[in-house]
Image (cartoon, rainbow, N blue to C red):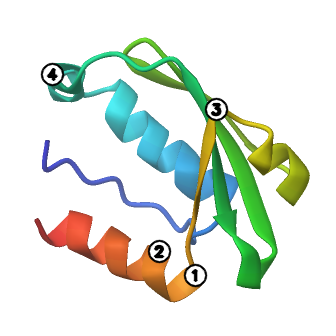
Amino acid sequence: MAQQVKTKATFPSVKWFEAVKKIINNDDGYKRFGTCDASVGIKVPEASKYFVITFEAFEVGDVKETDERAAEDTDFWIEQTYDQWQEMITNIADN
């Protein structure tokens, strides 16, 4: 699962989430984590960026940019500062 995709996408953006989606959906190793049926809001308030990501069984489904209200009208949402998101992404990439 140490797959990488080269993209010019910058976090946070739909293009960035689509690149992550491609990695997950094309690697059967992620299926060992089990299934998930949920809509998840992603919030980066200081950048005024909000997303909804839909998970369907073993795959990442739809990814769309939205407003804060729609990001909160999900099964759950994750909200962090931009720096916290960057720290988490770096930690995932390094480990």
Tag 3 secondary structure:
loop
| Residue matched to label 4 | 32
Return the disc, 3 or 4, that comes first in the chain's sequence. Answer: 4
* Res. 40 visible in picture: yes
Amino acid type, mark 4: Arg
Amino acid type, mark 1: Thr
Image: 50 above or below 54:
below
Which percent across, then down, holds residue 60?
Answer: 49, 28
Return the disc, 3 or 2, that comes first in the chain's sequence. Answer: 3
Q: Estimate how packed mark 4 is, as few (under 14), some (14 to 19) or many (20 or more) residues with alpha carbons within 10 Å.
A: few
Return the disc, 3 or 1, that comes first in the chain's sequence. Answer: 3
Image: 55 above or below 85:
above
Return the disc, 1 or 4, that comes first in the chain's sequence. Answer: 4
Amino acid type, mark 2: Trp
Who's the residue at 81% across and 75% down the image? 48
Image: 41 above or below 87:
above
Amino acid type, mark 3: Asp
Res. 57 mark: none
The CA span between labels 1 and 2 is 6 Å
| Residue matched to label 1 | 81
Res. 75 mark: 3
The CA span between labels 2 and 4 is 25 Å
Tag 4 secondary structure:
helix
Q: Estimate how packed mark 1 is, as few (under 14), some (14 to 19) or many (20 or more) residues with alpha carbons within 10 Å.
A: few
Tag 2 secondary structure:
helix
Who's the residue at 71% across and 36% down the image? 74
Tag 1 secondary structure:
loop
| Residue matched to label 2 | 85
Q: Estimate how packed mark 2 is, as few (under 14), some (14 to 19) or many (20 or more) residues with alpha carbons within 10 Å.
A: some
